[in-house]
Amino acid sequence: MFQIIPDRNQLVVAKLTDHFGEAIERHEVITDMLCITVNKEVINEALLFLRDDKEMQFNFLTTLCGMHYPEKEQLGLVFHLHSFVNNQRIRIKTSTDMSNPVFPTSTTIWPSANWMERETYDFYGILFEGHPNLVRILNVDDMTDFPLRKDFPLEDQTREDKDDSMFGR
Amino acid sequence: MSENQKQIVKPTVAEAPEGVSGQGFFATSFEKAVGLARKNSLWPLPFATSCCGIEFMATMGAHYDLARFGSERLSFSPRQSDLLMVMGTVAKKMGPVLREVYIQMAEPKWVIAVGACASSGGIFDTYSVLQGIDRVIPVDVYVPGCPPRPEQIIDGLMKIQELAGNESLRRRHSKEYEDLMKKYNME
């Protein structure tokens, strides 16, 4: 039965905290979009719960990308989920230590995560356990570095002709 | 009445090179004749990747008309073209592809790098963009611009015509050319 729920964001937070408790580290609403930080241990369970729950039905993974916080030495993931049924979007974030950047794969939950996880691996070096084909997708296959990490230099280092004074350095 | 008289415009013909002419014959150096033929019939391979490709489309259109210069027939097959026109940003992943296309072209072949991205990477000095196609293939003419106007692309083609018209027939077998090919690992 279609019910008009006054605040779907509150509903999602309530359901998640009931089910997972302490694993939901923080939640806030930024410009009408709910952003939830989840502990890495329960991330896959939480995503499955969000997808399969009959009241929330977050059946569409809009995007999945990586984050890098060098000052905290953390690599993380950001998931944007969308519920077609309820027209609601939420953001889920998880983080892990840079020494062990491994997350469980979401391809079992949403097949579209396949290429998104490959891109996250390509640019941040985050590994996904259980991914069917975790290889680079956009960069050259034999590249050894991870370009979107904050410590990767912006400019191509093989150029010798750029004069520092002209380029404001 | 004089306004209604049409101006008779003689069609432009290519200038004949120096030579000896007489009744029913014209003798000139083989190099000059071949150069004349080649330069006025350069068939381009438009390797258009980005915005410069759009400027090239304008150049091929009726207003700027590259076909006047003999480049009437564009071919996307490297085997059937003389001039490789690289127009636009070439990514590092595209580099080997461009190299293969260049290797498949038959001699004599010329390369023109149109635009800032093809010449030097342009404003995209990043991890993904090849900083100039001369890192993978030898280039004859660079046309700067972002994007260059059709007139500039035509100017670049005219410079290639100068090169093609004045090229020695033995150039492709010379030591310098072989060294150039070795530099790019193309034997």
Image (cartoon, rainbow, N blue to C red):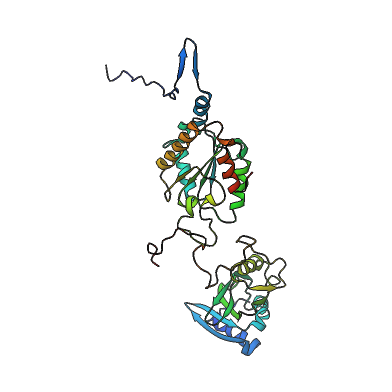
Relative to A142, B44 lies left or right: left
Residue B139: image location, x then y, percent: 52, 45
Q: Is residue B23 above or below residue B151?
A: above
* Count of numbered tags: 0
Relative to A56, B12 lies left or right: left
Residue B34: image location, x then y, percent: 53, 27
Task: Name, please, the residue furthest toward the top.
Answer: B23
Residue drawn where x is 27% and y is 17% of the image: B2
Q: In this view, does A119 lie above or below B123?
A: below
Residue A126 placement: quadrant: bottom right
Of B75 and B35, nearer the camera is B35
Residue B56: image location, x then y, percent: 47, 43
Residue B43 placement: quadrant: top right
Residue drawn where x is 58% and y is 84% of the image: A13
The quadrant of the rendering that contains the C terminus of chain A is bottom left
Q: In this view, does A17 lie above or below B94?
A: below
Would residue B81 be seen by someone viewing this image from the given angle?
no
Residue A82: image location, x then y, percent: 58, 72
